[in-house]
Image (tube, grey):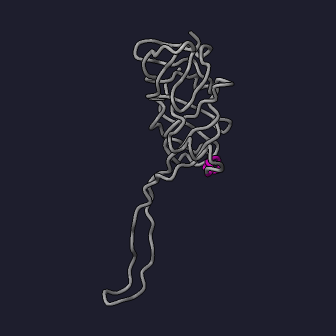
Amino acid sequence: MTTFGEAIGRAVISRETAEQVGVVRRLLVDPASGRIPLLAVADLPRPIVTPMAAGPAGAGLMVDVDDGEVPVLLDWADVVGFGPDAVLIPSAAAIRPVRTDGERQFAAGFADLTGRRLLTADGTLLGQVSDVEFDETAGTLIGLLAGDVRIPVDRLVAVGPYAVIIAA
């Protein structure tokens, strides 16, 4: 078992090349199934080298850095290992671009659970979701954390932009 807080920032490694191809930025929750279908991954920063034509200072190369902040996605089905230090995928080809508006919103953080209000189904505010526990071998949710309180995932009713609602 691990938490979203522990998973975010974890290296994503290609098993084919043993190279780091990204970093986990966020995990998407499907409340209906209690599963994690997608991970948002930030590309690694990499140099962009552009040849420069000869001019008064001579020919040369201009080097800039792609900051790697364009989000890309990884389907949970493509995760072959989720260890304490890295997430392994078959190859860099498993990382894909955002395809839909819903995926774009997820990649931008609009579906994040942490920090959302936590309400019971009868409308009682319990606080905020501080973290989410999940089984890293299966990609299934275990529970929500609200400070020191652990709420089992079977109490999850709905997730929306205003709050996370749990059974009373």
Q: Please provide the residue range marked out in magenta.
A: 92-97
* Residue 35, x across and y down, in percent: 64, 27
Indicate left or right for 56 with 16 as reference: left
Q: Quadrant of residue 33?
A: top right
Please determine whether, in this image, residue 14 is positioned above or below residue 162.
Answer: below
Relative depth, front residue between 61 and 123: 123
Relative depth, front residue between 60 and 96: 96
- Residue 132 is a magenta residue: no
Q: Quadrant of residue 156?
A: top right
Specify the farthest residue to the bottom: 56
* Residue 160, x across and y down, in percent: 56, 30
Residue at 52% x, 15% y: name it. 123
Please determine whether, in this image, residue 52 is positioned above or below residue 56.
Answer: above
Specify the farthest residue to the left: 57
* Residue 64, x across and y down, in percent: 39, 66
Residue at 53% x, 49% y: name it. 71
Report the label total.
0
Specify the farthest residue to the front: 123
Residue at 56% x, 9% y: name it. 168
Indicate left or right for 2 with 141 as reference: left
